[in-house]
Image: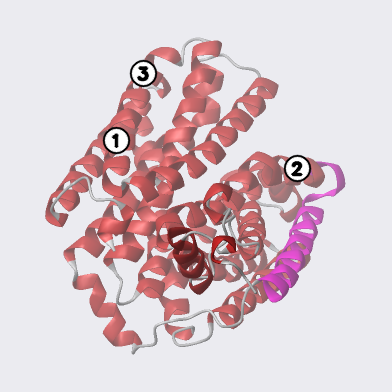
């Protein structure tokens, strides 16, 4: 017979029963937050491949031009063609993939990516290479758009921006690792070998998506024409406009960073390569930082990053004349430039909650539209006599516009200091 004294005290027994009913581990609160799901890795691998094929062509322009018998400026249009393909592909793929299961859609888009890069590697002429680049670009906006929503749905609400940032880490790593490695490979074995290598990355991503991505990802179904009405929402429009202008601010300066570092900072080609690598490290760090800050305070983080970005770009006018200060400024600029990407992507998903896949996909087109606009604005500024040293002031002006729109959008929300939980 069990004595009365052998039973645990009533308060302790009561807590134990409650813990069992809630399936709560006694040590669960000491372990910390659960890790990010492994399925996000498959999205990051795919982003790495897409980012590599988008930007690696810049390092291979002389080889492509020489092999296909075109001028370097004509070869440079392969960059513009890709960006145009993203802008066109965003609404087109949003319509074609509407209502399809997310896993099937993402694996199908990666299949299109593989086919496009195979065509790039085999293209016998400039025109066919341009067409292949556009085909490849079609999957870009849809993959990043749908992938952002999927990444956000795979984690708790308070970690959504970090999940998006983890996927976009593949894109930033493409600038740090994929582009330099692809350029070196293309210069060694010919530019076609780089595209074959990207095909291999695409196959790895395809397999990772099949294995790691869950099949039962929830999705909201709706009529595509009805979903397009979400663009009438002023907050959705503002979020995309900010994406365009922020991207334009970056590319108005970054497109011409090599001649700037060469003529103003007097760096050698080898030193410029190292500087771009450092900038890529900044992009990667900023991407992850932006995810954490956006999950904490989305709009204040975006506004704060833009304020500091404006100051850093203005400072670059002064620091660009000396190597060490210029390198330090490049690193900080890279951190700030990509710290605003996860907040902007999550902002679009949040404001377009009735059509997140469509809006997120279109926002990728907005980023690339900003790329093209920024490069054009920078070219116009240089043509009209703006010195390379003062080109960062163009980025300052564009960032000021983005800051004004961000403040307007935040004021339309109500209280500025809303947390992720309070937003949702």
- Of all residues, the one furthest to the right in this rendering is 189
Q: Secondary structure at mark 2?
A: helix
Q: Secondary structure at mark 3?
A: helix
Q: Nearer the viewer, residue 296 or 78?
A: 296
Q: Mark 3 to mark 1: distance in Å?
A: 17 Å
Q: Is residue 376 left or right of residue 64?
A: left
Magenta stretch: residue 266 in it? Answer: no
Q: In this rendering, does residue 384 appear at all?
A: no
Magenta segment, prevailing SS (helix, strand or loop): helix
Please report whichever mark, 1 or 2, sits nearer to the chain's N-terminal start: 2
Q: Which residue is mark 2?
A: 181
Q: Is residue 225 left or right of residue 357?
A: left
Please report whichever mark, 3 or 2, sits nearer to the chain's N-terminal start: 2
Magenta stretch: residue 199 in it? Answer: yes
The image position of residue 346, as x and y in percent, is: 37, 58
Please report whichever mark, 3 or 1, sits nearer to the chain's N-terminal start: 1
- Quarter of the image holding residue 423? bottom left
The image position of residue 221, as x and y in percent, is: 39, 87
**Range of residues picked out in magenta:** 187-212
- Quarter of the image holding residue 42? bottom right
Mark 1 touches mark 2? (CB < 8 Å): no
Q: Residues within 10 Å of mark 3 (few under 14, many from 20)?
A: some
Q: Nearer the viewer, residue 83 or 110?
A: 110
Q: Is residue 329 left or right of residue 104?
A: left
Q: Is residue 136 left or right of residue 291?
A: right
Q: Nearer the viewer, residue 249 or 216?
A: 216
């Amino acid at each position: 017979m069990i004595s009365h004294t052998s039973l645990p005290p009533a308060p302790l027994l009561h807590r134990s029963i409650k813990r069992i009913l809630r399936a709560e581990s006694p040590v669960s609160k000491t372990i910390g937050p659960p890790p990010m799901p492994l399925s996000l890795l498959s999205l990051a691998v795919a982003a790495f491949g897409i980012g590599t094929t988008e930007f690696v062509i810049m390092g291979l322009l002389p080889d492509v031009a020489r092999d296909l018998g075109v001028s370097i400026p004509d070869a440079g249009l392969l960059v513009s063609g890709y960006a145009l393909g993203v802008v066109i592909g965003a609404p087109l793929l949003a319509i074609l993939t509407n209502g399809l299961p997310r896993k099937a859609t993402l694996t199908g888009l990666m299949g299109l990516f593989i086919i496009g890069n195979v065509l790039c590697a085999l293209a016998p002429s400039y025109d066919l290479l341009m067409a292949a680049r556009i085909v490849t670009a079609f999957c870009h906006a849809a993959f990043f758009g749908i992938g952002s929503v999927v990444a956000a749905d795979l984690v708790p609400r308070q970690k959504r921006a970090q999940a998006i940032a983890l996927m976009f880490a593949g894109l930033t790593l493409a600038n740090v690792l994929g582009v330099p490695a692809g350029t070196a490979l293309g210069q060694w074995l010919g530019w076609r070998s780089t595209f074959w290598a990207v095909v291999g990355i695409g196959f790895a991503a395809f397999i990772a998506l099949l294995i790691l991505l869950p099949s039962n990802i929830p999705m909201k179904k709706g009529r595509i024409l009805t979903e397009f009405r979400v663009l009438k929402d002023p907050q959705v429009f503002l979020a995309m406009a900010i994406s365009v202008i922020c991207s334009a601010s970056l590319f108005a300066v970054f497109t011409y960073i090599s001649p700037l570092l060469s003529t103003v900072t007097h760096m050698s080609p080898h030193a410029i390569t190292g500087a771009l690598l450092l900038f890529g490290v900044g992009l990667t760090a900023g991407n992850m930082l932006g995810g954490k800050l956006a999950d904490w305070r989305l709009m204040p983080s975006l506004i704060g990053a833009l304020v500091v970005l404006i100051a850093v770009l203005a400072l670059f006018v002064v620091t660009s004349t000396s190597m060490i200060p210029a390198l330090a400024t490049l690193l900080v600029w890279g951190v700030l430039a990509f710290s605003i990407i996860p907040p902007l992507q999550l902002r679009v998903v949040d404001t377009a909650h009735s059509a997140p896949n469509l809006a997120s996909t279109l926002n990728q087109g907005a980023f690339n539209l900003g790329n093209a606009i920024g490069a054009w604005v920078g070219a116009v500024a240089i043509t009209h006599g703006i010195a390379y040293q003062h080109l960062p002031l163009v980025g300052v002006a564009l960032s000021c516009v983005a800051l004004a729109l961000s403040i307007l959008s935040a004021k339309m929300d109500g209280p500025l200091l809303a947390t992720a939980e309070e937003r949702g």
